[in-house]
Image: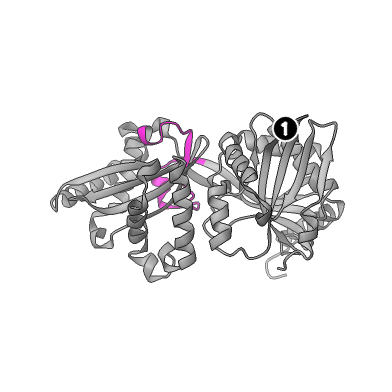
Amino acid sequence: MEAQPGYGEQVRSVGREPDDFAMEVSVRTPSELDERIIGAWAELEQRSVEPNAYLSPWFVLPALKHLEPRVPVVVILIERKGVVSRDLVGLGVYETVRRSGRIPMAHLRAFRSRHSYLTGLLLDRDCASEASRAYFRFLRRDSSWHGVEVTVHPTDGQFGAIMTEAARKEDVAWYEYGRSRRAILMPAKCGEDYLRESVSSRELKDIRRRKRRLEELGTVTWRALAGQEVDARCIDRFLDLEHRGWKGEHGSSLRSNAGDEAFFREMATHFADHGRAIFTELAVNEVVIASTSNFVSGSGGFAFKLGWDPQFTRMAPGRLNEIELVRNGGSVFRDLDYVDSGAAEGSFIEDLWPDKRTLVSGVYASTAAARAVLGGMNHLRRLKRRLPFGS
């Protein structure tokens, strides 16, 4: 896989359709984003038709700064131009790729750091259809890329319908190669009844038993910290717990890598400063033994990571923390429609969060050459599947 050559020359190319709501599409490098654009990006995220904390400037910019992207990254801006104003109505972040196994020609790939669990496109809810059409039109007419590869990309709901219709109208073909279901929490359903419906009576009995054992050690408390309550001490506690146990031993914790830790600190602080961080903590005698980190984007919540003290493994502190979150989710996440678990299909969280959303991976082919190549590759795959075993 190779970086797109000469991308610095392309980033200034502009696609414009004067008779279509005065939409203008441009491409920038991260270094070209000034305070005005970053501020407009943050505002767009909050009114996007599809919530996505992983496309927040408070997530993307720290990730680009500390996590060293594999290849050059560009930001696509979709702006609606008026007589005296220019409004940001769409934004996507992409890696530039010369070729890959999925599409053997120059293309874009939705940016996904090693801590990103969702890709997508921010679209202003008031003009999402027009902005998405301008996006696909730019790819088809005005860029030198042959398409866009996306992974863990939302497909259900209004966003999925808008993207499907816009691609169809702009003659951009979709080639899907993966689909999965991800657990989500519905705050409106949370509470004791939701727990009884989601968790077996045997499991609930075991949870109560473990909590009693924990209470034998002292006073057990649970709390949710929001906004600027998520301060440096709260972040330190989380990082310490997330580093303990097998994650630290295997070098996969945030604290195992200086860049990962710096990314998390900066990202979490930005979200907290904007009132969009929610951490939960389980404590014994005021000593925190389990913690979760969650972030808010628009009307959606995004569970990020969790940690617990392995000294208390027999009492399952991580599980107890998650149980309390489900029990109290209606108040903790009262302004949110759902919370995305960020978990892979088959995760333990599905036992507690039974509702699901659908995510897809695939390629939007925006040129005739890409459609021909991807169509041919799909045909060969179908033929291969039909061949007798061992042929």
> For residue 25, which quarter of the picture?
top right
In this picture, residue 291 sits left or right of residue 44: left
Q: What residue is shown with label 1?
A: 85
* Residue kind at label 1, given as amino acid type: Ser
The C terminus appears in which quarter of the rendering? bottom right
Image coords of residue 362 (percent x, y):
68, 52
Image coords of residue 170 (percent x, y):
81, 39
Residue placed at 61% from the left, 42% from the top?
41
Give yes or no for residue 244 being in the magenta stretch.
no
Label 1: which secondary element: loop
Instruction: Name the one closer to the observer, 239 or 228.
Output: 228
In this picture, residue 370 sits left or right of residue 180: right
Q: How is the image coloured?
A: one colour
> For residue 146, which quarter of the picture?
bottom right
Residue placed at 36% from the left, 66% from the top?
246
Highlighted range, magenta? 331-356
How many marks the image carries: the answer is 1
Instruction: Name the one closer to the observer, 97 or 23.
Output: 23
Instruction: Name the one closer to the observer, 242 or 170.
Output: 242
In this picture, residue 22 sits left or right of residue 348: right
In the rendered image, the vertical position of residue 153 relative to residue 379, given as above or below: above
Image coords of residue 367 (percent x, y):
84, 51
> For residue 72, which quarter of the picture?
bottom right
Give yes or no for residue 355 being in the magenta stretch.
yes
Residue placed at 35% from the left, 57% from the top?
236
The N terminus appears in which quarter of the rendering? bottom right
Is any atom of residue 314 visible in this view? Answer: yes
Instruction: Rate crowding at label 1 as few (under 14), some (14 to 19) or many (20 or more) other CA atoms within 10 Å.
Output: few
Is any atom of residue 352 visible in this view? Answer: no
Image coords of residue 370 (percent x, y):
82, 55
